[in-house]
């Protein structure tokens, strides 16, 4: 690059766009502790008492809350700051996406939930991701999950997906689905179809970087009905109402671009992207996908819990 461009070698990357980079022989760690600290100071919670989970399990908030309104500008500013923090903190992705739904007319009830996220961040400032060298040829493995009608205003479900390249997480998403699912099977199938689109794109990108054909992506789903629907070309009464756009998953399975595999709910890594989890389960996510071991070991720990 020095032959083509005028540039100066400043050594190993240590800080970039608010992301701290620590490189060593053990791997590369990314975190945003300084940026997170600035968010807390801006919100006036720099010395707050930390909490252990970002959002309460089974918490249901609606847009038509009877609680008093709060300052919209302050609320939107904090939420916007947290949305950048999720680049290295998938453990708060669902919680931040959830409070983002109420930016139009936030109330004190929504603000209390937002402050709980900040208190959780305060107790995990140094948390980050560690990327380690794979011991063998890394495979692209995805996890797809969904809740069922979690939004009490629209009754739409939430899609969560997690992709690992070998032991390292490379992509995660948590989004509200665009249609109302009529069954758990449909909600999981829609989530899997979205994950298939992302997985195929990642496989093509890796293929271009490696100079080879895109490989088959393994997609792990915790719903056997959704897996059966992705492989069975016959539509029955329980699935014929599903929009044809989501049958892209079936096409990918038939072409060999996606391989669906069942995984029990206890080992579903995308679970944290679809709902609030209890403290014990969140603690496992903090210990393993965040800055430590590989996904397979984390799955074993989740299943043992």
Image (spheres, grey):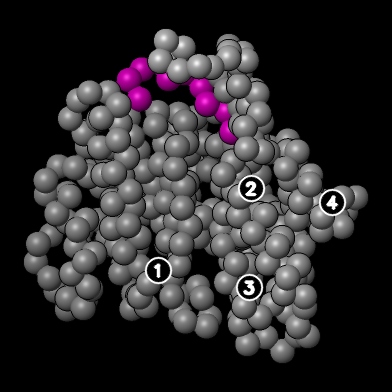
Q: Residues within 10 Å of mark 4 (few under 14, many from 20)?
A: few
Q: Is residue 233 left or right of residue 12?
A: left
Residue 111 drawn above or below residue 280: below
Q: Report the span colored magenta.
A: 128-138
Residue at x 57%, y 54% (from the top left corner): 93
Disc 1 element: loop
Q: What element does badge 3 sit on?
A: loop
Magenta stretch, main secondary structure, is: loop
| Few, some or many residues within 10 Å of mark 3 (<14, 14–19, 20+) | some
Q: CA distance from mark 2 to mark 4?
A: 15 Å
Asked if residue 161 lies left or right of residue 99, the reply is: left
- Return the residue at label 1: 177
Would you say 138 lies left or right of 284 here? left
- According to the picture, the residue beneath numbered tag 3 turns out to be 103
**Disc with the residue nearer the chain's start (4 vs 3):** 4
Residue 72 among magenta residues: no
Mark 3 or mark 2: whose residue is earlier in sequence: 2
Q: Mark 1 or mark 2, which is nearer the start of the sequence? A: 2
Disc 2, SS: helix
Residue at the location (21% across, 66% down)? 245
For residue 215, above or below residue 272: above
Q: Nearer the viewer, mark 1 or mark 3?
A: 3
Give the residue at the far front of this rendering: 6
Q: Is residue 196 visible?
A: yes
What is the C-alpha distance between the residues marked 2 and 1?
A: 23 Å
Which residue is nearer to you in this view: 32 or 223? 32
Residue that appears at 45% across and 18% down: 5
Viewport quadrant of the N terminus? top left
Mark sitting earlier along the chain (1/3): 3
Say the numbered circle drawn on residue 85.
2
Indicate which disc, 1 or 4, sits on the residue closer to the N terminus: 4
Direction right: furthest residue: 47
């Amino acid at each position: 690059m020095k032959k083509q461009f005028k540039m100066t070698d400043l050594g190993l990357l240590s800080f970039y766009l608010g992301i701290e980079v620590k490189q060593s022989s053990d791997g590369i760690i990314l975190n945003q502790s300084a940026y997170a600290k600035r968010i807390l100071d801006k919100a006036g919670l720099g010395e707050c008492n930390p909490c252990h989970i970002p959002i309460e399990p089974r918490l249901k908030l609606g847009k038509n809350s009877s609680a008093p309104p709060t300052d919209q500008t302050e609320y939107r500013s904090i939420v916007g700051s947290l949305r950048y923090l999720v680049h290295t903190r998938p453990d708060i992705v669902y919680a931040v996406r959830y409070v983002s739904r109420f930016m139009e007319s936030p109330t004190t009830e929504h603000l209390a939930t937002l402050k709980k996220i900040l208190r959780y961040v305060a107790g995990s400032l140094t948390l980050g991701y560690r990327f380690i060298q794979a011991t063998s040829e890394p495979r692209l493995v995805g996890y797809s999950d969904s809740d069922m009608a979690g939004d009490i205003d629209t009754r739409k479900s939430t899609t969560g997906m997690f992709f690992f390249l070998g032991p390292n997480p490379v992509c995660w998403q948590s989004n509200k689905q665009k249609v109302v699912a009529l069954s758990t099977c449909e909600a999981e199938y829609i989530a899997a179809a979205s994950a298939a689109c992302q997985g195929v794109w990642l496989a093509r990108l890796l293929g271009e970087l490696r100079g080879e054909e895109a490989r088959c992506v393994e997609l792990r789903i915790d719903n056997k009905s959704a897996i059966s629907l992705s492989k069975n070309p016959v539509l029955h009464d329980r699935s014929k109402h599903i929009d044809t756009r989501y049958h892209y998953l079936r096409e990918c399975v038939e072409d060999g671009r996606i391989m669906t595999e069942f995984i029990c709910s206890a080992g579903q890594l995308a679970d944290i992207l679809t709902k609030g989890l209890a403290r014990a389960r969140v603690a496992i996510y903090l210990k393993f996908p965040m800055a430590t071991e590989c996904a397979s070991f984390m799955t074993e720990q989740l299943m043992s819990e």
